[in-house]
Image (cartoon, coloured by chain):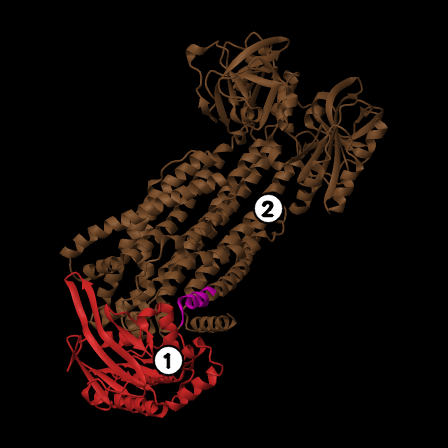
Amino acid sequence: MVPDSQENIEIEATGLSKHVTSSEGELAILSDFSCRVLGGETVAILGASGSGKSTLLGLLAGLDVPSAGRVIFRSEDLAQLDEDGRAALRGRHMGFVFQSFQLLPSLTALENVLLPLELAGVADADERARAALERVGLTPRLTHYPRQLSGGEQQRVAIARAFAPRPSILFADEPTGNLDAATGQRIIDLLFGLNAESGTTLVLVTHDATLAERCGRRLHLEGGRLKQ
Amino acid sequence: MSGDMTFALKQLRSAWRAGEIRVLLFALVLAVAAMTAVGFFADRIESALGRQGGMLLGGDLVVVSDRLLPEEFTAEAHKLGLRVAQTMEFPSMIMLGEEGRLAEIKAVSPTYPLRGRLTIADEPFGDARKADGVPAPGEIWIEPRLASLLGAKKGDALAVGERQLKVAAILQEEPARGGDMFSIAPRLMMNANDVASTGLIQYGSRVRYRLLLAGEPAALDEFRQWAQGRLERGSRIEDVSGARPEIRSALEKSRQFLGLASMASVILSMVAMSLAGLRYVRRHLDTCALMRCFGASQNRILQVFLVQAFVLGFAGSLLGCLFGFAAQEVLARLAGGLFLEKLPAPGWTPAFGGLLAGMAAMLGVMLPHLLRLRGVPALRILRKDLGENAVVSWLAWLPGIAVMLGLVFWSARDAKLGWIVLGGLVALLLVACAVAAGTGYLLRQVAATSGGTWRVGIANLLQRPGVGIAQVAGFSLGLMAMALLTIVRGDLLDNWHASLPPDAPNRFVINIQPSQMESMRQFFVQEQLAPPEIFPMVRGRLVAINDHPLDTGRYVDERARRLAEREWNLSVAETMQKDNRIVAGRWWTASERGQTLISLEEGIATTLGIKLGDRLTYDIGGQRIDLKIQSLRKVEWDSMRANFFAVTPPGVLEKFPASYITSFHLPAGREDVLNRLVRSQPNLTIIDVEAILAQLRGIMDRMTLAVEFVFAFCMLTGIAVLYAALSATQDERIREVAVLRVFGASRRQVRATVLVEFAGIGLLAGLVATIGASLLAWVISDRLLQIPYAFNPWLAMLTIGAGLLLVPAAAWLGVRRIVHVSPRQVLQSV
């Protein structure tokens, strides 16, 4: 299933494993996973609950370190970087959309979108944040707090926040997991539409086969292993 | 960094709008307000008490000299904006016709007294009124005793040196009367402008000149420093603390209590801030994880939060100072009316101190929390449990502990008190942690066998052992600070009241001859007064210590030299007086009668560098006697009873000529007794200390009020701060209650869960606080204030009861409203 092209590789994972030690002994969450994701590609990681999808996403995005194997992101070996190095890499290249939205409750919609832009020191942060929110249709909700927004609206803010810094790759973890079917559908349309416009690489974790269908490529995980 | 600054400020503003930092800010504002209010108020009360004491001195500061002071002293005082008065005191024979008596003349400048007042009457022991100024030129005021000795009355002309001066009033009360009360002749007060014309002051006359000063403490300090280097031998500076031992002792105790109250507010505040900091951290874990996710480095996160803590610290401290200032103004207005004079204006030190203390407390307390935030992993975005219980090196707590120690010492104003309380605090924290951990084990056993709300409540306690211990320790400290203040306040006030009972002796009779002992007793019986205890008094001079001739020149301290040079009043006692306490050695037994032993007052022994076991040689009327120091005594000078620096067993001093002294209480309205006593035994000298006693009572009453005010204020602060501490952990409770509601728990079940959890915490805290407060109060009473301590079981029960009832009640109040709101809404809000 791994594409042959050696050019334009965004992420290359080789022999990734993640074990955790619990009172019942060692538990393998992910075993010997390898794949390549090319720039501009849309990849769905499919699997049931507990299959290791989110763990894999965490490893690919450098949020976590593997027990074995390595991840190369744009020719940088994530294992060679320290925590701050990986954070800087994420700040420059990566965007995130989460199942539970992860909006900060104390910030308004606009301030939530501004957060990554201001952290990156973007000069025209305010305009870009407003433009991003306009693109997701939330201009009338700029000063609203997350608790004043519906689930769909919160996820739209999260999508605006993910795209505003213009990342080269977007990681989405069950983006419709907390939403009803109709709202979920609208969010997916928005996500794919924005992705197409910006040419961003998309790595999407889901257990929803229809959603996965919209991606160019699908990787199935089962019991922490890639199903061939 | 400037980008980070803007970012940090924007985040802070958002957090403020969302109400996330209100509890922390509230705790800080309260902390600083309490510290500065007590600081400001204590400062003002202290200087007011100083002035009140100054009334006994006639001024705030006095330069005493046996020579006329150079003019530059007065000029310097005027330059510093101080008020000035001069007095001259010298003994002289006063004549009325053929009758002559030795009097202690005091010539005063028109501005005398600067503090306190003169009261006069038209006849001895008649209706007293406040004098308007000083005796006019050509006039004099005389004490009742002089009037009685000379048979003089208002309007008579007395010969004072070469002048005839008219008695214009009977002098009833004057500041600074007392001093060495056993060697004073009756007072005659005259105008300083008349002195030259009396011709009494010649070269070699024994005159004591006094320059009295009053004004702002800073100016007084400056004057003291300026004068110190210019004083010649025979001159010294006196202030209220050196003036009278009984006032010094009472002032010292009230200062220590105010220090203790101030310390209690520091402790309470730091506890509240630390717990509020916990909440702040929990609310920012997600922010940090997200920031890490978006590329922020750990140091950047630390910088952002440090900037926030700094800004918050500054704003909170400033606000706290303002509130503190306002609160003390209210306190001062309430208390001010109870003082004779207006309370002096507060200094700026407490404001600066409060600002610095607030900042230091904020940064010190927040550092470990911020380091936790710095360490939050980005993966928390996907796994909520991460970063929740991040452990910070114990080193991170050091700055906070150092700040607390620093503040405690600063507010204690007394190193010994600081160390005692700190030792107690450390011990209490260890006990609290041990008790909380031990109880955790017990609760686990209970939880296993109980059901329903009990299990949930106990499970909540056990779920976060760290937070549980922090809460128990926090509440214990808070309750302990309040209980400690209550105990010490009670003991202190009881002790004060007991030291000056309504029937405290108000008259001393000296110069009683051995032959008059019996007639004195009969006189008291006839007058239906209780016959007083009569003490022998032998006057002797200390000439050698351990066979080394006494060289008074070796004493650098002026007071020590004076004490060593003057004649001692040695007394005899078989049993020790009730208001004395042995601090070293032991009192003699009956079998030691006649042995050449001596018991010394510990203060004079320290001043003169004399130890237990030393041998003192006294010269009594040309005969020498060696006495070995068998004990050192602490004397309650504020009891106003006849007390002696030096006492020997019976059978030692009997061969020397002695006179006797007694003191008794004369009820108001029976002053005629005194006239009869003097008439029947004309050689007796009666010293009226009623006025001093009244002044002393007035001072103690005001100190009592000051102590009560500060105490009440600290209690209110304590309750408010404990509430702040409680609301600091409210988020978890709200979340738990919402979850219980989701699963259909009734209001009653929810209440029971909360009550069980917090009754557990409150009970433990109450127990630990009671033990800590009782032990600390014992040490403070015994070692520092030197007042008797009695364990109060009611207060112990009250403290435990307060923990058991108030903590759960307040916790329930905090979450009560949530049971009316939909769980979804609740969960979204925290």
Q: Is residue B672 left or right of residue A15?
A: right
**Can you give x and y, in whole percent of width and height, for residue B49 in the image?**
59, 42
Q: Colour of chain A?
A: red
Q: Amino acid at mark 2?
A: Phe
The boundaries of the magenta stretch are B296-306
Please say whether residue A105 is visible from this viewpoint. no
Amino acid carrying mark 1 in the image: His
Whether labels 2 and 1 belong to a single chain: the reply is no
**Circle 1: element type:** helix
Q: Considering the image in quadrants, where does the C terminus of chain B appear?
A: bottom left
The crowding category of the residue bearing disc 2, from other C-alpha atoms within 10 Å (few below 14, some 14 to 19, many at least 20), is many
| Residue A91 point in image, percent of width and height | 39, 76
The residue labelled by disc 1 is: A93
Task: Give me the residue at 29% from left, 50% from top.
Answer: B764
Examine the image and state in which quarter residue B108 appears: top right
Q: Main secondary structure of the magenta part?
A: helix
* Chain where mark 1 sits: A
Which residue position is annotated with label 2? B339
The crowd level at tag 1 (other Cα within 10 Å; few <14, some 14-19, many 20+) is: some
Give the chain coloured brown: B
